[in-house]
Amino acid sequence: MGENIARHVANGHTFFNVLNTLICLPFAGVFAKVATRLIPQDKIDTVSLGEPKHLNYHVIADSELAIEQVMKEIREMLRLVRLGLSVSYEAFKDKNYKKQIRVSRIETAIDNLQREITLYLVAVNEKTNADSIIQKIPALLHTVNDVEKIGDFTEEVNRILNYQITAQKTPLCPEFSAIIDDLHAKLMFMLNLCVDYLENLEGDYSFKIIEMEGRINEQHRNQRNRILSLIQNGECDAGGGLNTIDYLDQVEIIADKLKNLVKAGSHKFVYQHATPLAVVGDEQ
């Protein structure tokens, strides 16, 4: 008798579970969308960790197409740079430690893309006989190296914002915070322009990028001198002033590297006097 009751209870549970599954199955897609909205995926977790999206070794024989794939991958590098700067700034504003420690992960992804693009360009160089392509490869290698350097500077920006400034004895004053806010906005705007520029190398974008680099340079020079004067006269917290200057310096360097990208693009990534491949690949 006891065994029959246990069997009936087990059968009842099984029937109930199967019935629920049949009822819910048509709504599985809806439930998935609701769950995604309720538990949004962290944008950092969607980073490909530097896995190339566009480098296809099967098309290397078509060198023009291969170079187009390289340009797309360089844009992916710039998107990661933009993400790293955005996350660093958000961590600084939100005082979010979990965000700031992820910047090194993004920088590692940038390094990996540099390596993969470099290997791909070397493979293209070995396969092609087209002078027009051979002349582009040194400039493209140089550009990839520049973007990788920007990734390094992005990690330095994160260190300044989320380690140096947070370690200050005195909180950053509103004036210095406003300087950081303004420069971050300018740099992100410049990066957006660069990502768009690499799609078709349109002249309108290049003029805007060079103009923005000039504005950042001017602001860097003026604000740097002003903050140094404040420190010397004892009119501000010295630690906050020096850390803000460090941030100014990094932003100016990043903007300068982005301008180099446009200068190379304006010549269609062809040097007037082509540099040997090995030399450009080793250039710092």
Image (cartoon, grey):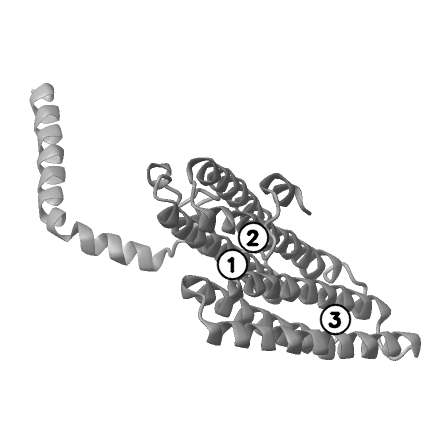
What residue is drawn where x is 11% and y is 50%? Answer: 26
Q: Which quadrant, please, contains the N terminus?
A: top left
Q: Which residue position holds label 2?
A: 139
What residue is drawn where x is 48% and y is 42%? Answer: 121
Q: Nearer the viewer, residue 22 or 235?
A: 235
Q: In the shown orientation, is residue 78 left or right of residue 52?
A: right
Of tags 3 and 1, the one toward the viewer is: 1
- Give the alpha-carbon distance from disc 1 to disc 2, as whole Å: 25 Å
- Give the alpha-carbon distance from disc 3 to disc 1, as whole Å: 24 Å
Q: Quadrant of residue 166?
A: bottom right
Q: Position of residue 103 (x, y in %)?
A: 58, 52
Q: Nearer the viewer, residue 255 or 14?
A: 255
Mark 1: amino acid: Leu
Label 3: how many residues lie within 10 Å, few (<14), some (14-19) or many (20+)? Answer: some
Q: Which mark is residue 83?
A: 1
Mark 2: amino acid: Ala
